[in-house]
Amino acid sequence: MASADKTINTDVPEKDVFAIHFLQSLSNLRTQNLFNSPDTTNYRVRKIKKAAYVSMARAAGGTSRLWSRALLRRATKGNNKIVRFPRKKRKVTWKISSKRRRSDQRAPVVEEAAERLRNLVPGGGGMETSKLMEETAHYIKCLSMQVKVMQCLVDGLSPK
Amino acid sequence: MDMSDKDEFAAKKRDLDWRISDSNNPMSAPSQIMDSSFRQNLWDDGGFNVHTDAGTSFRGNVDRPLEMGGWNMAQFPADSGFIERAAKFSFFGCGSFGELMMMNQHSNGLFVQDTQKNQIGVATGSKQVDGPVKVVKENGSSNVSEDSQSSGGNNGHDDAKCMEISSKVFNAKKRKRTGKDSEQEDKKEKDEQSPNSNANKTNSGKQASDPVKDGYIHMRARRGQATNSHSLAERIRREKISERMKFLQDLVPGCDKVTGKAVMLDEIINYVQSLQCQIEFLSMKLSAVNPVLDFNLESLLAKDALQVPAPTFPQDMSMLYPPLPYFSQKGFMQPNLSSMSTLNGGLKRQETHGYESDQHNVVQMNPETSTAPDHEKDTTANTEVEP
């Protein structure tokens, strides 16, 4: 899986994968009989949005990426029958705090922006800046892919 | 006389109870103190792993001669034999010491650092030192000297020479030590070049600070190692971050002209936000569209498949990205309605360019799905795009 950059691997699956995942989630939503019944379109919108994010996370690699893992964990807070999270040793917490303390001293310009990025990218809170940028790159790729898929869908489904 | 003295010393060096003071030192107390430290230094002969213990003790020792600098000068008798010995192994004499350390640099790093210190407050070695010093060189043994401040006959002008020499030695020493650092760092899989450049940097840094810090050489040495690894780590981290920033720059459209980390990061943040807004907007659109049509998975996939294999659209790709990311939601609506077809065509076009393997997959998918709806949709899509 070598991408253009040797050290950073931000390969993203094909558009088909994203499309399939999204369509599956949409059909699941449909079978839940949500449409035409819920009170507000807002509810539907939120459901669709959540389905979009979850399917994107699944298509992008499931639990192999930090951001996707965080997204899925956030999405299935109460009932986790959907995703299986691999067990990882939780020594990370101590390292995170120590890294954070040092990263405050390092180039405050970069760190401020990194802070804002952390709020945007799911799972960014526990990452060092360099790792954060990797995840951001992959996240951007996946997001753009998902946007394309959804755009195609909308275009395809919209009445002519 | 010189040779015999040296033989004595060489023999006694291995004996841990060796005390120079025993031989012929009129000054008992301070020399004994120093000798004990010298003894430890002898243990370190040939390896400089025992920095800390000998270092600290030595530092304590070295402090005293500096304090007692003037007093030592006064007290040391101009004994010829004493002077010679002191000159040879002149630990506290500057001029000879530098040369001495050059010869003995392989043996004990501690000596080097102490020269740096010693030359500060101590009278320099005299020219008469040169003779015996050369003899010592042949021996190649790092011997200890008593307080050889008696050798400080000619103070003034060996100072400069001493500084140069000892700084050279210090350089060599530094290079070796940073070489050791580089071993440690290579274990951590760091740059190979950076230790060298870092060594040069720290060399100059250390030289600059040498005359300033009295009595803390060994602390400084250890701190020097720490700052080496830290600054190395910092530099490597910086490089990582800038490498990733470059990668992100390729990803985010419109970031070629932007230089500087802050602005680029702002751009990236804006782009991520805009993408997320787009998803939200599209999901709203989908929820509006949804109740109209049934979800037929295969047909939907066919629709997606249709998007790709239409390579003859002369749409401008660049128009896709500039409008999309930076439209607000409302703004997106109107141009979207009007330029829906062009966007569609643009999307298709871009898809063909970006994902050629997609094309293959999709083409394979095409024959699988039913043909009739495809044809219909084909025509509609075509009529849509070609104005």
Image (cartoon, coloured by chain):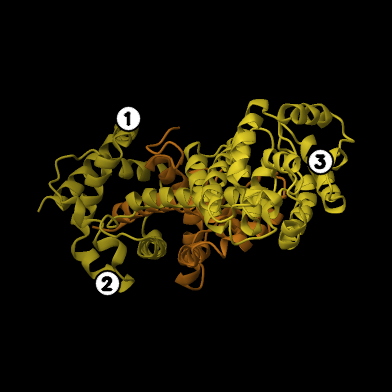
Indicate the chain on which mark 3 is placed.
B
Could you tell me how far apart the alpha carbons at marks 2 and 3 are, in whole angstroms?
Answer: 80 Å
| Quarter of the C terminus of chain A within the rendering | bottom left
Residue B152's x, y, as percent?
A: 65, 52
Q: In the drawing, what numbered circle is on residue B40?
A: 3
Question: Residue sitting at 27 percent across and 69 percent down?
Answer: B333
Q: Are marks 2 and 3 on the same chain?
A: yes
Task: Check the image and report above or below for B379 versus B344.
Answer: above
Colour displayed for chain A in the image of the structure? orange
Task: Check the image and report above or below for B386 versus B132.
Answer: below
In the rendered structure, which disc, 2 or 3, sits on the residue that comes first in sequence?
A: 3
Q: In the drawing, what numbered circle is on residue B364?
A: 1
In the rendered structure, which disc, 1 or 3, sits on the residue that comes first in sequence?
A: 3
Colour displayed for chain B in the image of the structure? yellow
Q: Amino acid at mark 3?
A: Gln
Q: Nearer the viewer, residue B188 or B193?
A: B193
Please give the residue where the numbered disc 2 appears in the rendered image.
B331
Q: Secondary structure at mark 2?
A: helix
